[in-house]
Amino acid sequence: MNSETNIWKTRISNAIPLILLVVLTSPIVIGFIWILISTFSKTTYGLEPQGGLTLDNWSFLWEKDTKIWTVTLNTLILSVGQTVAVVLISSLARYALSRISFPGRKAFLSMTLILHSFPAVTLLIALYFVLRWISDIPIIGNGLPIIGGFGYNTMGGVILVSLALQLPLGVWLMKGFFDNVSWDMQRAALIDGCGHFRVWWQIIMPIIRPGIAALTIFSFITGWSSFLIPYTFITDQQNSVLAAYLRSLLSDTAPVSYSTVAAVGLFQLIPVMIFFIFTQEYLMSIFAGGSKGGT
Amino acid sequence: MAATGQTIAAAPPQEGLRSKLRSASTGFWFMSPALLLVIVFFFIPSIIIFGLSLTNLSTATGFQNWDWIGFKNYEKIFNHPSTKTIAQATIIYVVATLTLFNVGMALLVALLSTHIPKRAGFVFRTLWLLPRITPSVVYIMMWKFMSAAEPYGILNRYLPFLFDGKNLLPNSPWVFVILTNGFVGASFGMILFASAIESIPKDYMMAAMVDGCNIWHRIRYVILPALRWPLLFVTTYQTLSLLTSFEQILLLTDGEFGTEVWSLWAYHRALNNYWGNFQWGFGAALAVIMVVIGVVAAVAYMRFFQFDELVQEPRIEAL
């Protein structure tokens, strides 16, 4: 055996996984390169812009009667509202499930697990009727500022539905973090006369910050790109969220400018990409920690 | 929805009925927002949807002239000419996407990305997460341009010797349905598998190498056994997700070219179709069948994994 061939052998065997990965990942990379290129060109033939580069596709940002800022604001309201509510409600529930012994605890836990794998979208038809009923309640239904209320065809209603669908996940995601808080600390606080509510807010919540971060990241990203629920429950696509606005550009009867659609799409993607790049290491390490015991 | 502002008296751990009752009511207060949401948005809808499925409610009947029709909707489903094709399409879609991507590709990418330098592996895994965080409308548009006719389509332009220049979607809709769903779905398993592989103690690998194992032996005898639990989890969990997901198909083909799956069928019938005749009753019956399949599968998989074991690693349920 000579050492030269050996070195080559290891080099090749090291390079093979890399080459394979590049090939497998190429559709994703090519696709995103296409999005980037097409937003600055009139039309594209494959990846090549035709007729020079242009900023026209981005004119939706500064046109006079543009809807983009309303829609962006709505998307922000939906993502932030949903995120705050999911974090608060699921950590409250989780505190009870992890830290207080009460009857029905196990039943609720297994129920959330069933809900977690429950085909939630199949409930859309029924949710439509529930939201219509909520609409009939005065003020709460559709008379609130900013979110418009909690009924059908309001941002509040969309927030409530998205929130409910995310809840089982939130409850399960938080469990590991709550379980790891030391019991002595909680016991000491309770003996010192602290109420459960203060224990939750002042002692446990600061400790489980990584868990809150994970749920926040996940929930915000989901909310920002959510499509089906706002699309189904808000009738005016032009006053809905970004994803539904995008869809309305596609389904208009007038000839579709795909470059504009790509530009709006990129506009929607950029904030969440930046958000993701800054938080991903965090998110990944949480996944990694979570699966260790499972192997 | 703000947190319930209840300040509850301290309950030092002590035995007795009173303290038990007190901790029960404390637990209840903490649970109440979650409980309320679960009741309003899961329980009541489930009941409504079952009730609806026993009526002929539609835009044609309006909210005044509808009737209870018993199990006629279910009868109609079983005798419907499309039922068989749609059920078959659903099975093809779920099985193919699951084996090729959500498990197969996920495992492949996880294996490859853990056998290259750490930083590079991280970059590739991030790239694979991109489809998941991209708005589905843009993501699907990207694929539409992959498959578009000459001169726009990427595949037709750069691989002219493989394709005939026409739009590829109508001729091979399933390829694209599976690809679009698969590239989103693969990241779930990929992350779980990759972290499981990375948590295998280095000694095991060393021992295997010293014993003269080649790469296939290492995968077969060291890595796969360590992945048993994540593999089972991803398989069952993703089966359920795929069964009920139709967003990508809705945007890609809208059920054309024979790609209508069961959940999309229910959606089209009840909430979104060109004729504006929303058959809530019939759609609800379709949905009930899905709910039943979903719950049976969920219960089966809880049995299979032993609930108590699952309780120990909830953080895994993250995507």
Image (spheres, coloured by chain):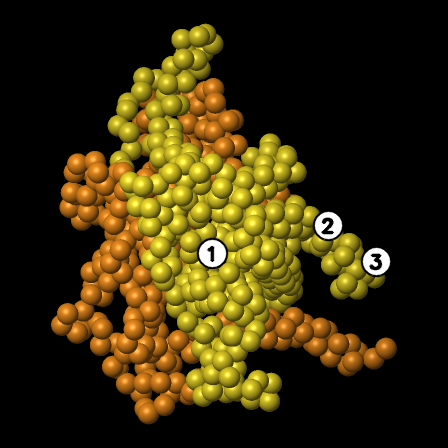
Chain colours: A orange, B yellow
Q: Amino acid at mark 3?
A: Asp
Q: Amino acid at mark 1?
A: Leu
Q: Nearer the viewer, mark 3 or mark 1?
A: 1
Q: Amino acid at mark 2?
A: Pro
Q: Position of residue B137 (x, y in %)?
A: 39, 65
Mark 1 surroundings within 10 Å by alpha-carbon count, few (fewer than 14), some (14 through 19), many (20 or more): many
Residue behind mark 1: B264
Residue behind mark 2: B225
Q: Is residue B231 visible?
A: yes
Q: CA distance from mark 3 to mark 2?
A: 18 Å
Q: Quadrant of the N terminus of chain A?
A: bottom right
Q: Is residue B143 above or below residue B200?
A: below
- As drawn, the residue found furthest toward the bottom would be A51
Q: CA distance from mark 1 to mark 2?
A: 37 Å
Chain holding disc 2:
B
Residue behind mark 3: B211
Say left or right for B151 vs A41. Answer: right
Residue B165 vs residue B211, the one in the foreground: B165
